[in-house]
Image (spheres, grey):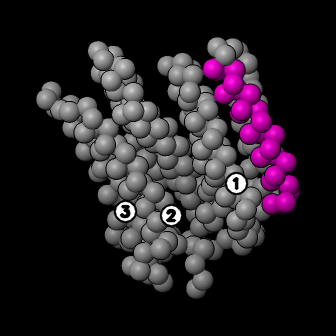
Amino acid sequence: MTWEQFIYFAIAAVLLWAVGAWAAWREKTALAYTSTVIGLVVFFSFILMMWISLERPPLRTMGETRLWYSFFLPLAGIIVYSRWRYKWILSFSTVLALVFICINLFKPEIHSKTLMPALQSPWFAPHVIVYMFAYAVFGVATLMALWMLIKEKSFNSQFSIFNSQLDDLVYIGLAFMTIGMLFGALWAKEAWGHYWSWDPKETWAAITWFAYLVYIHYRQIPTHKPRLALWVLIISFILLQMCWWGINYLPAAQGSSVHVYSMPS
């Protein structure tokens, strides 16, 4: 399996996800589930074959991690749809997944078998995979927050109910992010001899984790303002983007961050 075949799997998966999104709007629940799940299977089959072809997890470059994010977004979408039956969620998750797929199509990165020693730890794959799922869940939560800010006046008394549903997503995302950080600490100990070093990547990971923790604790205050809580969630997602890929462009990470693997040595 080579990167050139990605477009065929991507087109098939996106078409299936689009059918699932259409079915959700038409209240054809069985078709929404079936089409979305088949699309996930098709897309994951490419990831799996790339894994076999590369003889390592496809998790090293930004292009490879975007593969996982494109997969986990519809997965998170179908989970949310099965829980709360939001008609729009599969449409949003499909569009977002399409954006990341298009980035990979128009700006492909080199996918080689070479894997530096630090990435050969058994903790590397679970660390990144768990993190990508958490990112996808937070992406869906952010879409919900934006939608709620726009539709707040039409919610009236139901606004608090939607906020509670949003909290569930944040709890799930933060739980997986915490597990991912623990896996990362074990990986760091094995690769570099210490659990945490306040590397730029690790620093932004901590900032992001605390930001979502602020949201959760602020929501527990009886006098909290729902709109402010939604904005905290949106800002947290912006911080997450800095943690994920933004640090690649920070001067502090140039030549010093052990987590920037695609940079020339």
Q: Is residue 19 left or right of residue 204?
A: right
- Name the quadrant containing residue 241: bottom left
Marks 3 and 2, the one that precedes in the sequence: 3
Q: Residue 16's spot in the image, x, y percent? A: 76, 32
Q: Magenta stretch?
A: 1-25
Q: Nearer the viewer, mark 3 or mark 2?
A: 2
Q: Is residue 20 magenta?
A: yes
Callout 2: SS? loop
Marks 3 and 1, the one that precedes in the sequence: 1
Callout 1: SS? helix
Q: Is residue 187 left or right of residue 149?
A: right
Q: Residues within 10 Å of mark 2 (few under 14, many from 20)?
A: few
Towards the viewer: 84 or 99: 99
| Badge 2 amino acid | Trp
Q: In the figure, 167 relative to 56: above or below?
A: above
| Badge 1 amino acid | Cys
Q: Residue 10's spot in the image, x, y percent? A: 77, 46
- Name the quadrant containing residue 117: bottom right
Report the number of discs: 3
| Residue of label 1 | 102
Quadrant including the N terminus: bottom right
Q: Residue at x 49, y 72 (%)?
A: 248
Q: Residues within 10 Å of mark 3 (few under 14, many from 20)?
A: many
| Badge 3 amino acid | Trp
Q: Which mark is residue 232?
A: none
Q: Residue at x 52, y 53 (%)?
A: 127
| Residue of label 3 | 204
| Residue of label 2 | 245
Q: Residue at x 45, y 69 (%)?
A: 247
Q: Residues within 10 Å of mark 1 (few under 14, many from 20)?
A: some
